[in-house]
């Protein structure tokens, strides 16, 4: 399946863009090359993965700017606050988890979730919502499974915020 995305702007990666020779031939109305039928399912997936360019959506700049009335300077202020304050919230999640304190963990996840939603970091918001729910149930073993992905997404968001602010300076 071919999922096309717009070219990335200067600050964030916009979407997932998977393409393969097979997709391109099919979309062009030509029958796929016959040798593709002799490949195993694993070989096909491997060749598609090698040719795929994955660009995850980290935050939604367009939507955030629109919600701020198109005011670019206000967007930069919001991103600067997010860049300086969100690491503290992220650290609170780690500290609460290390103390095995489900109440503080739920509160920290909820607060960071709100901040991430301001800039449209929807994948991070969804993970934090899940951690918030799990913490409410005191299911810290399940929280442990979510934390590495939250860390990865949070770090990607920080990089995008840094890039955006540097490009605007």
Image (tube, rainbow, N blue to C red):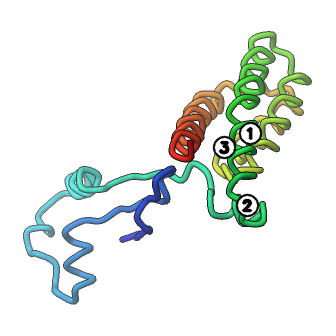
Bin the neighbour count of mark 2 within 10 Å (Cα to Cα): few under 14, some 14-19, many 20 and up: few
* Residue occupying the point 74% across, 12% down: 98
Marking on residue 124:
3
Q: Where residue 108 sits: x, y (%)?
A: 83, 28
Instruction: Classify mark 1: helix, strand or loop.
Output: helix
For residue 17, which quarter of the picture?
Answer: bottom left
Mark 3 and mark 2 in contact (Cβ < 8 Å)? no
Asked if 88 appears above or below 23 in the picture, the reply is above
Asked if 101 appears above or below 115 in the picture, the reply is above
* Residue occupying the point 54% across, 53% down: 57
Mark 1 and mark 3 in contact (Cβ < 8 Å)? yes
In this view, the residue in front, 91 or 136, is 91
Q: Where residue 43 sits: x, y (%)?
A: 20, 53
Instruction: Classify mark 2: helix, strand or loop.
Output: loop
Bin the neighbour count of mark 1 within 10 Å (Cα to Cα): few under 14, some 14-19, many 20 and up: many
Labels 2, 3: front one: 2
Marking on residue 128:
1
Distance between the alpha carbons at the discs numbered 3 and 1 = 6 Å
Distance between the alpha carbons at the discs numbered 1 and 2 = 28 Å
Please identify the residue farthest to the left as the structure is shown. 35
């Amino acid at each position: 399946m071919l999922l096309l995305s717009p070219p990335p702007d200067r600050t964030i990666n916009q979407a997932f863009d998977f393409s393969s020779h097979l997709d391109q031939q099919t979309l062009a109305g030509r029958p796929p090359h016959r040798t593709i039928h002799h490949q195993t399912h694993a070989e096909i997936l491997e060749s598609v993965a090698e040719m795929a360019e994955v660009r995850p959506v980290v935050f939604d700049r367009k939507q955030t700017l629109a919600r701020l009335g198109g005011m670019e300077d206000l967007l930069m202020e919001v991103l600067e606050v997010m860049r300086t304050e969100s690491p503290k919230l992220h650290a609170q999640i780690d500290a609460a988890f290390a103390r095995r304190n489900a109440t503080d963990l739920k509160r920290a996840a909820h607060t960071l979730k709100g901040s991430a939603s301001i800039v449209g970091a929807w994948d991070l918001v969804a993970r934090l919502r899940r951690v918030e729910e799990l913490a409410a149930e005191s299911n810290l073993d399940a929280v442990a499974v979510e934390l590495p992905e939250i860390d990865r997404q949070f770090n990607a968001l920080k990089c995008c915020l840094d890039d955006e602010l540097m490009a605007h300076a």
